[in-house]
Every structure is written in structure tokens, then in C-alpha cells.
Amino acid sequence: MISPSKRTKEISYAIREVVVYARKLEKKGIKVLKMNIGDPIAYDFDTPQHMKEALYKAALDGYNGYAPSEGYEVLREEIAKREKRRNGVDYDIDDICITTGVTEALQIFLAACLDEGDELLVPGPTYPPYNLITAFHGAKPVPYATIEEEQWQPDVDDIRKKINERTKAIIIINPNNPTGALYSPKVIKEIIDVAAEHNILVVSDEIYDDIVFEGKQYATASLAKDVPIITFNGFSKVYLVPGWRVGYALFYNPNGELDELKEAYLRIARARLCANSVCQLAMVSALKGSQKHIEEMVRKLKKRRDYAYKRINEIEGLSTAKPQGAFYIFPKIEKSVWKNDKEFVLDVLNEIHVLFVHGSGFCPIYGKNHFRAVILPPIEMMEEAFNRLEEFMKRRLGK
């Protein structure tokens, strides 16, 4: 028997691992209502036609070889224009690196930034790769509290308490996965101030930036003034192309503090060759073409958010905060006969054939006794799922 590396033993990705259990039921011919995966294309959303045509044209035009490691200049120029237009932030194209989705952007960053024993402050709960990739590099993810009663806003005092000499960066995910929280500019500024006080980098994941139901999403770099910020963003969610895998990293570097880290980042980017060439060209069309699909998507999602929020809060034993962005909702299991939230999720799956993701998979401290659902499905599908869930809860709680 050939043993795997020790570093692989702790890898766990809750969002996809629950699918393994669902597949066992599907092999038996059982239909599962999937409320687990943040993929709009899995439901009734579709990629805009002009982007599909741009992808095909890029292949016909011969963009089938390797792209530059940093990404095509034409795409980086359009991203810089978007940042100036949307957020009022100036970027040179050399401050932008195109990646294979946001996940690769953060993989490269964590490899470039973290040494063994370093610590990374991550929101609790958080998108799981921030925890697992940090640990993979021998560093420690440290969750900071977000306040459920305040729509999951970050607890800045808790961030301040958890900073020490090993802390390398503070992660912001705004809007947040898994809670759907939209961070206020006041809270973002407070986090920036704490980071500046301790000379700690802020990393802002903004992949859901244009999927907002109330208020406005403020880019962290737009509030930072002279504090360096690394931003992750991409096209998967807002432009409805999760399978195309195109993201990017932005280096807001007003005083040159990020020069060495950016060069380390780009060295790793060169070593992994490049992001998808034809998809990069199609993303130019995404940025320059019609944006009407975004308004339509947000309109549909807001109706679905309103329905899910109302319906979940009507179910005995459950409660939920109201998400303001992204396409997730993170209910709390108020009354429980289960030993943990994963047991709850698997019981739901096996008994009523509805698939959620257990909250502890997003954070064992601040995610426990919760589960994540998506608000992407049509209301008819969510109605069926929540009707089943309501009857299930009545049976389990003896009502």
C-alpha cells in the first residue's frame, strides 16, 4: 500500500462531500432535491448568449494555445476599467493576475504568503478552502466571530483580540458565503484600521459583488486609502459561468508594500502556466457587452430570498437571519435531537431526500448547529423542499 502525504489527511470540503451521500440514493433511483450547490447553471439560470458566442469565436480565431501567465492584457485592461467605473479604484494591468477561478487566486496567495506556523484570520463561518488550504500549508486558520443577530456582521473586537505576532492577514468575504451577509462600510473601515494598526494585510473576496438585494456592496480597496489590499474576484457567479473557471487577483498597492508579495505571487502563477485561454477572451465580451442579465438574476434571486427567509422562519425548530447578498441562506437549528449539524443534514437527506450542507463544514465554532441552503432554485422547488422539511421537523421534534 502506497501511503498518501500526511498533509492530505485533514482535507475536507463539506459542500461536495455531502453529494457523495446523495449519489448513493440516486443510484437507487431516488430523486434528491439539491439545495446544496452554489451553481446557478444547475437550476434555471443560463450563461448569456453573447458570451457563449464569444467563447466559440475565440476558439475559431485561434486562441487555443497557452495564454500569458498573468492573463491576456485585453482582459486585464477591461477589469481595470470595471474597477475604476464601479469602485473608483485605479489599477494598472500589472496589478492584475488572471486565475483559474477565485479558488486558484486564493491558493496562489496562501502559498505565496504563509509559512508554517503562521495564522490567517478568517470569518466564522467561511468558504471552506480558506480553512483547508491554510492548514494544507502548515499554517493555522483562526475564525473570528460574525454576529448572527446583526445579519452576520464581523465582530471587529473579536478580530482585534485574535491578532498576534503570527497573524499574516485578515480575510473578508463580502457578500459572504455561506451567510449571505453584506458588510457595512463602517465595519469594513474598522477592519482596515485594525489591519493598518498591526501592519497586517487585508484580503477581500468579492466574487458576489453585484448580487445584492438591499444596500450597496463597497469594495474594500475603495475604502482603504493608503492601506494595501488584495482583492479576489471572478466571473463564475455574476456572469453565470462557474464551469469556465476564470477569476482574478487585484493588488491595491499605493505605497509599494505589496511589491515582494506580488512578485512571489506571479512566480507561482508562472509556474502553473496560465488560466483558460478561450474563456479569458470570452470574459472580455462579458465586461464590454450587455449587463442586463445581472439585473434579471438579482430580481429573481430577491424573490427567492424573500420566500426562503419567510418559509424557513415558519418551520418549528428553525430560524434564520435575512441574507442581503450572494445566493445562500444559513438557518440555525434552534431545537435539536441530533448530536450535531452533520447528523441533521444526513438525516434530512435520507428521510426526505433534500440535500443541504452542514454548517460546521464552514466553521466548527461559528457554523455549528446551522446548515447552508441555496436560494437559487425556482420557488416551486424550494416550496417542495421546505414543505418536506417542515413535516420532517414536526416528526423529529414530536409535534
Image (tube, rainbow, N blue to C red):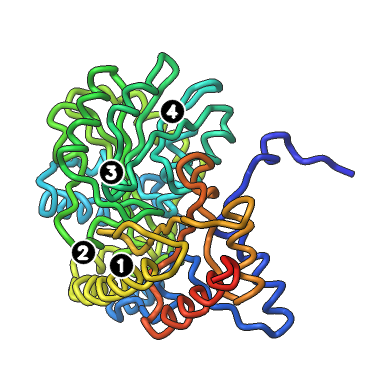
Q: Earlier in the sequence, mark 3 or mark 2?
A: 3
Disc on res. 239: 1
Q: Quadrant of residue 4?
A: top right
Q: Earlier in the sequence, mark 1 or mark 3?
A: 3
Q: Which amino acid does label 1 sit on?
A: Tyr
Disc on res. 118: none
Nearest to the eye among marks 3 and 2: give it.
3
Disc on res. 213: 2
Measure the alpha-carbon separation of dots 1 and 4. 29 Å
- Number of other residues with Cα within 10 Å of mark 3, as a class: few under 14, some 14 to 19, many 20 or more: many
Residue bearing the label numbered 3: 153
Callout 1 touching callout 4 (CB < 8 Å): no
Q: Which of 86 and 20 is in front in this view?
A: 20
Callout 1 touching callout 3 (CB < 8 Å): no
Q: Earlier in the sequence, mark 1 or mark 4?
A: 4
Query: x, y percentage for residue 18?
Result: 61, 62
Query: Which residue is found at the position 41% from the left and 36% from the top?
Result: 122
Callout 4 touching callout 3 (CB < 8 Å): no
In this rendering, position of residue 369 left or right of residue 306: right
Q: Earlier in the sequence, mark 4 or mark 3?
A: 4
Query: Which residue is found at the position 66% from the left and 65% from the top?
Result: 20
